[in-house]
Image (tube, grey):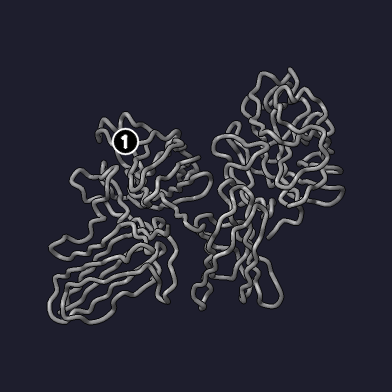
Amino acid sequence: MLIASCLVLNEVLHNPQGPESGAGSAGDCREFVELYNTCDTAVSLQHLTLQDNVERDTLLPWQDTTLHGLHPGAILGATTLAPGAFAVVLDPEYATSLCAANPLLPLAPGTVVLRPGDTDLGNGLSSTDTLGLYRGTQLLDRFPGGWLTGDGHSMERWNPYAGGGDPGNWHENPVGSTPGGPNRTTRPLDLGVSAREGTGDTLWMLVWNGGYLDAQDAVVRWTRTGAGEDSLRIPPLLPGDTFQIPLIVSIQSVLQKIHGVGALPGDTVPENDTLDLYRAGTLQGLRITEVLPNGSVEWVELWNHTPETLRIRSGVLEDAAGTRGLLPDTVLLPGAYVVLTGDTGAFRAQYGDLSVWQVEGFPVLNNQRETLRLFLSGVIQDSVAYRADHLPAERSLERWSAAVDAFDPASWTPSQAPSGSTPAAPNSVEQGEPVQEVSLWVSRKVFRPERERLRIRYALPLSGPVLLSLRIYDDRGRLVRRLRENTVTGARGEVLWDGTGEGGQRLLPGLYVVWLEGRAGGRQVRVKQTVALWHR
């Protein structure tokens, strides 16, 4: 559901770093509420009020120029907010000597500053406070309360173009707050998808540029129940621009998934249908490929399966209990593996000088079952669910293919390595069946169809007529191409693949599984290989 007003509540800090109560305390001085103008025209800041659970405050322009001594780039006395600009409501005591003992907020230059008409925001913000933004008697937007955040951690709106009253549209900033600037959890959300009801059975799918990144091409891909898959490349969108796609379907339920971005709360698509958004030329590059939950040193392995250097920014590893480990801001080279752990010294003492990153606040991995999520700048990269009820100590769980759904516990297998694990190296279970039994060879692990076709060679230990099946599956386990599905007289051969799907359409960048199966004389063998398809 799209918002009804240009002006939205975008960030709330109710638990600043420092003492919570008392004159001059952080709780008395450093709370803030951030507003954001989502429209392409300026909006008035006059006649606004902010309501918490107890009282309603009139919002006024900040006039005290003392604030310029602390934040020279702040905009004071403003009564309008420019398109795509931010306004922050601060306690009127914020710039006084009474509050000097507590940490200042990282107020971004160009922020319009407002203040309540009395001496605090509401009656002082708390974790239970809900907020309402009003113009006169009209409710413009809402913030649902109920979060216990860490000291100095704000609650940020994930999608500024979806309803603020939805609790699913708010996330805790993992490291602090961003007053006057793009939210840490929203920043990468450049292209989003929303749905508008048209007339009859027409659904207008609205694609928008949230304004945080540059204009770029994107591909929207969707699947309709009983109607197969469809896709459309949309034109580059400037910040704030939208593009509408008509879909002849009925409107029933909540959006299930937007690939690479996640579900946008409040948006709708038809029941049992999925909707995917891909940025052109980009690919989620990180996979969780190995986990050691029961050892003297616990760790998680990541793999960059792309041919590009990945820049790691604002990385977070989160477990089922909500514990969040913060990854260092650095880079990961093409095809490289790295281990995440809370104690690099102990890890190297046990495994040697391998590629390893220290993770602040590394989660304690449950030895029976666990759910892990990997984020970069608030965007989920991978979700993992494993079960390890009978896993011996010091033996890892390995993902048998980076292309399979890691949220399915069946995607994880105890390591077959003699040492019990393969940290910062290819997994032992990725090797498939022994070569003397069956072999499958591909010419490239990273395949660019614009440059060449992918050569696939196979050899099966079968004789006589062989029922051969050679298929391509995508990273969600869906069949996208049958390369060979017939009876052959020889168990060796070579097939070329041009990177297209069953209907000849160009497939999107991503991980694909080459799956080979042969049957003859009551015997069946199968093997697989993972390749990354890349357009450049």
Kindly identify which residue carries mark 1: 297
Q: Position of residue 259 (x, y in %)?
A: 50, 59
The residue at the point 65 percent across, 71 percent down is 203
Q: Can residue 5 be seen here?
A: yes
How dense is the environment of label 1, judged by Cα within 10 Å: few (below 14), some, or many (20 and up)? Answer: some
Q: Position of residue 512 (x, y in %)?
A: 36, 63
Instruction: Indicate the quadrant containing the N terminus: top left, top right, bottom left or bottom right.
Output: bottom right
Q: Position of residue 352 (x, y in %)?
A: 24, 33
In the structure shown, which secondary structural element does the residue marked by tag 1 occupy? loop
Vertical order, 415 against 355 (above or below): below
Vertical order, 289 against 467 (above or below): above
The residue at the point 35 percent across, 62 percent down is 451
Instruction: Indicate the quadrant containing the C terminus: top left, top right, bottom left or bottom right.
Output: bottom left
Q: Can residue 404 be seen here?
A: no
Q: Position of residue 202 (x, y in %)?
A: 66, 75
Q: Quadrant of residue 483?
A: bottom left
The residue at the point 64 percent across, 47 percent down is 157
Pick out the residue farthest to the front. Answer: 451
